[in-house]
Image (spheres, helix red, strand yellow):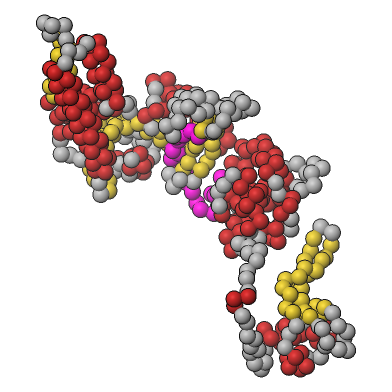
Amino acid sequence: MYLRRCGGSKASQTNTYWQLVESVRTESGPRQRVVSYLGALSAPVCDEIPVDEWERGWYFKRQIFEEDLGPSWQEIDTGRVRVERMRDFGAVWLALQIADILGLREFFGKALPIGQAEIGWDLVSRVLVTCRLIAPSSELHIAECLYERTALEDLLGLPADKINDDRLYRSLDKLLVCKDALEVHLKKRFEGLFAIEYDLLLYDVTSTYIEGEGARNEQMKRGYSRDHRPDCKQVCIALVVTRCGMPLGYEVFDGNTTDVTTVEQIVAGVEARYGKADRIWVMDRGMMSEDNIEFLKEEGRRYILGAPRATLKKFEKELLKDDWSKIRDGLDVKLCASEDGTETFILCRSRDRQAKEKAMHEKFEKQIEDGLTAMAAGCQKKKQSVATINQRIGALLAKNSRARRLFRVDVKTREDGGAEVVWEKVEAQRRWSELSEGCYLLRSNITKATCKNNRAIFCRFQSSKICGLMV
C-alpha cells in the first residue's frame, strides 16, 4: 500500500492531490486499486516531506509507525458530508473464512466443471454459500439487493453486474449433481472440527409450498400441508440430523408423499453414503408402520419411534403409578417392557405439553357445550329438521374434534316431527382425557438383552436421556 500523486508536477505542490493505493493480484496480473482519495493534504505537512518520499509512501508509513509527527486537524462541515456505497465487510469475511475451513473452496474447484462460462461455477457457488450464511434469502434477492451491499465484489473480485438470478440458479443446478459427494465431504470435516457423534440420528419430514402452478416442476403437487395451505402446490423435504442438530443429509419428495413411505429410502441412502454403523434412528409417529418396523429390524437396526396416541390407552395403569423418573424439569419418563420382551415402551409426561393440551381441551369443550346448548334451545323455540340438526352437530364436532369424545349427543324426533337435542358429558372419557394430557408414548427395540455387548448404550437409554430428544 502506498500514496500516489495526482495532478501538478514533482517540482511543485500546486494543485496536487493524493490517493491511497494498494497492489492486488488478478487473473490478468498485478493491478493497482485505489483505496481512498485523500485530496489535497495540508501545506505544512507536505512541506516537511520530500516529494520522492511521498512517491514511495514513506509519509504514510511514518504517520502510522512514528510518534514524532503530531496530529493534523481539519474542520469539517458535517451537514455537507454524506456516506455513499456502504459495504458490509465483517460478516462476509467471516463467512468466507468458515467456508475455507470447511474446505469448500477446494471442493467446488474439483467437483464443479470449468466449462466455457465467463464466471466459474466454483466462484458463483462461494457467493451462494456466503449469502446463505450471512442473510438467508432467495437467489433473486441476492442478485438484486444483497450482493451489492456486501464486500464480496472486492473480496472475490467478482463485479456486481456479473451476478444475476439466472447465473445463481444455474449454479444451484450444478451443485445438485454434487449433492451426495458434498454431504460426505462435510461429514468428514465436521468429524474433524467438532468431534460429532453419529450414534443417534433424528429424521423428520416437512413441506414448503409455492404461489403459482409450478408447471415445470413435476414434484410440485397438492398434499398434506403443514403450513395450512392446501390450496397451494408443495414439495416435501426430508432431513436427517445428529443429536446436536447438525444436518447429515436431505431429500426432496413429491408434495403428495406421506411420511411413512419415505423411511426405507432415507435409511438406505444414509447407509449407502456412510456405511451401516451401529446407530439409533429416532422418528415421530408419522413414520411408524409395521412394515417400517420390520424393515428396521431386518439388519439389526435400532430405533426409537413415536407410537400412535391410541396405544397410550393400554398403559392406563402405568400412568396412575408414581414411579416416574425425572429427566429434567418438566419431563418425566417410565420404561415398560413389551409382552414378548423384544421391545421397550417409553411413557413420557411433559408439563409444558400438559398445560397446552389442557388449554386446548377446555377451549374446544366450551365451544361444543355452547353450540349444543344453543341448538337445543333453538329446537325448543322453533321446529327444526332432524337432518339439518344432525348436519350442524356433525360440523360442530368436526370443528372441535379434540373434545368431541367428551360428549354423548342424541337427536330425537318429537311428536310434531321436529328435532330435539339431548346431550350429556361422558365423565369416564373426561377422566381419561385429564389423565393422558401431556403424555405420549415411544417404542424401541433397545432392551437390556439387545445391548448386552454395549452396556453404556443401555445405561444411557435406561436413564431415558435419549427419550428427552423427542419432546
Q: Residue at x 45, y 39 (%)?
A: 201
> From the image, which quarter does the N terminus lie in?
bottom right
Residue 206 magenta-highlighted: yes
Could you tell whether 374 is left or right of 306 in the image?
left
Q: Residue at x 82, y 83 (%)?
A: 15
Residue 49 horizontal/vertical position (percent): 78, 91
Residue 388 horizontal/vertical position (percent): 25, 13
> From the image, which quarter does the C terminus lie in?
top left
With respect to residue 286, does 163 lie above or below? below
Quadrant in which residue 82 is drawn = bottom right
Could you tell whether 468 is left or right of 16 in the image?
left
Residue 464 horizontal/vertical position (percent): 30, 41
- Residue lying farthest to the front in this orientation: 382
Q: Is residue 120 visible?
A: yes
With respect to residue 203, does 144 lie above or below? below
With respect to residue 386, does 282 lie above or below? below
Residue nearest the observer in this picture, 45 or 374: 374
Residue 335 horizontal/vertical position (percent): 26, 35
Q: Is residue 93 visible?
A: no
Q: Residue at x 51, y 53 (%)?
A: 194
Residue 226 magenta-highlighted: no
Quadrant in which residue 315 is drawn = top left
Could you tell whether 391 is left or right of 30 in the image?
left
Question: Magenta span covers which residues?
Answer: 185-208
Mark count: 0
Residue nearest the observer in this picture, 202 or 274: 202
